[in-house]
Image (spheres, helix red, strand yellow):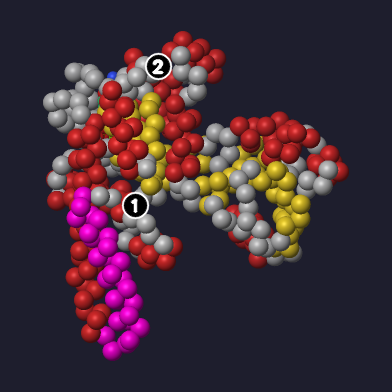
Amino acid sequence: MSLNCGIIGLPNVGKSTIFSALTSANAKASNYPFCTIDSNVGIVDVPDKRLDDIYNIFKPPEKIPVSIEFVDIAGLVEGASKGEGLGNKFLANIREVDALIHVVRCFENEDIAHMYKDLNPKRDIDVINLELVMSDLEVVQKRLESIEKLFKSQDQKVRDDAKKEKELLKKVESILLEGKPVRVLDLNIDEKMKLKNYNLLTLKKMLYLCNIDEDSINKKNSYVREVEKIAKQEGAEVLKLCGKLEQEIAFMDDVQDKKEFREMLGMEVSGLKKLIKKAYKLLGLETFFSKNENEVRAWEIRRGTTAPEAAGKIHSDMKKGFIKAKVYKYKDLMEYKKEEELKEHGLIRVEGKDYVVQDGDIIYFLFNN
Ligand SMILES: Nc1nc2c(ncn2[C@@H]2O[C@H](COP(=O)(O)OP(=O)(O)OP(=O)(O)O)[C@@H](O)[C@H]2O)c(=O)[nH]1
Ligand SMILES: [Mg+2]
């Protein structure tokens, strides 16, 4: 199953517009706050020039990219964590995703209703982030209450574990009480593993996505600058795109038309491509490639994945019977163009079960059936 990014934000900021551009499917988008109630899910291919380059060298029948999932979630409002505007349901949707894309409205348009009268990205961001914080606080405080009974256990280990968990949760609670997201805490691996069970919203990675108007594509926009400042303070990523135009382009059939339209607007790179790539990184994913006579294929892995685990992505038998991996680098292939040349230059390595797969590796696994 692919990992997913949830698209969140206030109502009517352009979440569904961006989602439908991403998936080129007609996710319902309209000028009514709360237009999205059930979340839409779309699977999107991750563009990767390296896959195209490898494919162009070997030219097997098929080329298969990696994909990630986007979830278009309904707009949150102030008080969502208290159940306002179906808030709890929407927060539950957010709890299920792996990372967050926070859409912030940075376009002025009197015809498009906004929750508040004026445009103020900082206030909008604060509203959403506070709801996420409040929702996490409720989870943490509930657990802190229920953990108390564990201290009465006869089992020393249960009591010790409960003590450790309480200490951790207290640390988390105090950061939330300051109104800050849990992701700003410096947690060790052990603590991260423990917190995983709670699926905390503010521990998920977040990317701020400024939805701008047509005029701001090649111009500075003071709203975007404001969001950039906030993102910098939080160590979060930020990206701007014009949802409406991206949607229009996504719906064009002809590739050449798309290209010309982009050029006319001075958009060299597709905003959507940038967004998908950033989302992929946000999910902590890297790519290795496999090739055989039928296909060249990209596979997503988490940083730190070993060779047998990577083999298991392709087939569980490959992991079970893993013997070794023949590995070479994408950049070496680009330099020498042929596997024979790579071999001659000693650039095809044989790696064992402890090898940590690197982004851009091209791998052939040998295994026992
Ligand atoms: N001018 C302009 N309008 C936009 C842009 N992006 C979205 N809109 C318009 O804003 C309105 C709301 O867009 P949606 O994508 O439905 O907003 P949403 O955030 O999904 O809204 P909810 O699902 O109600 O929370 C629609 O009328 C869009 O056409 C943009 O970049 N520029
Ligand atoms: Mg929507």
What residue sits right under mark 1 in the picture?
Answer: 183
Q: Tell me the residue at 25%/56% (across/down).
A: 175
54 relative to 280 in the view: left or right? right
Q: Tell me the residue at 25%/79% (across/down).
A: 150
Q: Does the stretch in magenta take in 178?
A: yes
Q: Are marks 2 and 1 in contact (CB under 8 Å)?
A: no
2 relative to 366 in the view: left or right? left
Amino acid of disc 1: Arg
Residue placed most toward the observer, 17 or 128: 128
Query: Chief secondary structure of the magenta span?
Result: helix
Q: Secondary structure at mark 1?
A: helix
Residue placed most toward the observer, 14 or 250: 14
Residue 160 x/y as whole percent: 32, 80
100 relative to 135 in the view: left or right? right
Q: Does the stretch in magenta take in 351?
A: no
Mark 2 → mark 1, Cα distance in angstroms? 32 Å
What residue sits right under mark 2 in the picture?
Answer: 218
Q: Crowding at label 1, few (<14), some or many (≥20) Cα neighbours within 10 Å? A: some
User: Can residue 237 be seen in this snapshot?
Assistant: yes
Q: Secondary structure at mark 2?
A: loop
Q: Which mark is residue 42?
A: none
